[in-house]
Amino acid sequence: MTDWSALDDAGAPLAPHVGPFPNRAFLEAWWRHRGAGTPIIAGAGQSALACVVGDGVVRMAGEGDLTDYHSPLGADPRPAVDSLLGRLPANAAIRFDSLPGEAAEPLVKALAAAGSKVTSAEHDATMVLDLPEHVDAYLGDLNAKQRHEIRRKSRRFGDLGGEAGLRRDESGFRTFVEMHRAAPGDKGAFMTTEMEAFFRDLLDVPGSALDLLIGAGGRPVAAAFGFEDEDAYYLYNSSFDPSAASASPGIVLCDTLIRSAIESGKRRFDFLKGVESYKRRFGATPRPLFAIAGSVP
């Protein structure tokens, strides 16, 4: 059985603003439901790196499709890198992904200093919205077209579904899952029984937040599964009732979540991976993520 407790003694993630993803609670939940291969929790002092080895390749723990950020723990990754490389066979391939620049550059230097030949390249991005101090300034920061569009859809939601309200309620997890499964195509197929169990475990991760968008008569029409810390809200997943699609519940949900984050004093709203156009319409900008490739010396 893997002992993930070594991550508890490590420092904060090397890259800032990465949510729960590099920490023990998230990675341990991921491993219980999605893990495969041989886990290695490498570290020394406050430096730690959680990895998985399989088929001759070492990767950071947490598959890229479900783990929006990877980062070593601690201010200096070199001790963890030395510990990791000392436990791997020579010539094993290194494939790290989803690294913000603040983690990728020091990690490349640490690997190179230990004798590994590695390269780094941008491979994905998250979308991040810097939040103003006051809700009134939020729409004012958008261009006139986007501001008008969000307001129009919010009014339409009010006409069709009643005034939008947000309710934080973990007991709405079943609603979140059912709306997910009601979606057509890949989105509906995503929420398998295994994935449902994974998300249920994520409710125990510190900072997890399940919010329901409430319409007419108190009926939930959309749901957001996210994480928050002192400075930021991270929108991890969402779903909505397909029968309410004409009221644009997805857009209204994002607008309401952003307003709620501002009111609670957050300074960042992170849409996480994917550069979909709707995120840009809310004013979010890309945060590049890097992949490191190479081999163990």
Image (cartoon, rainbow, N blue to C red):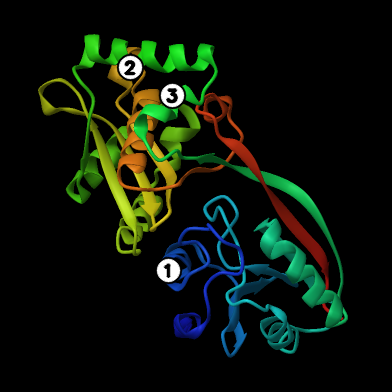
Q: Residue at x 50, y 26 (%)?
A: 141
Quarter of the image for the C terminus: give it.
bottom right
Location of mark 1 (residue): 32
> Looking at numbered disc 1 in the image, what kind of residue is underneath it?
Arg
Location of mark 2 (residue): 154
Can residue 1 be seen in the rendering of this structure?
A: no
> Looking at numbered disc 2 in the image, what kind of residue is underneath it?
Ser
> Looking at numbered disc 3 in the image, what kind of residue is underneath it?
Leu
Q: Residue at x 61, y 34 (%)?
A: 275
Give me the C-alpha separation between circle 2 and circle 3. 12 Å
Where is 45 relative to 149, above or below?
below
Location of mark 3 (residue): 139
Considering the numbered disc 3 on the image, is that residue within a helix, a strand or a loop? Answer: helix
Where is 16 relative to 140, above or below?
below
Q: Earlier in the sequence, mark 1 or mark 2?
A: 1
Residue 199, image x and y in percent? 36, 54
Residue 195, image x and y in percent? 40, 51
Residue 93, image x and y in percent? 80, 70
Nearer to the camera, 143 or 3? 143
Label 1 crowd (10 A; few <14 / some 14-19 / many >=20): few
Q: Earlier in the sequence, mark 2 or mark 3?
A: 3
Can residue 262 be seen in the rendering of this structure?
A: yes
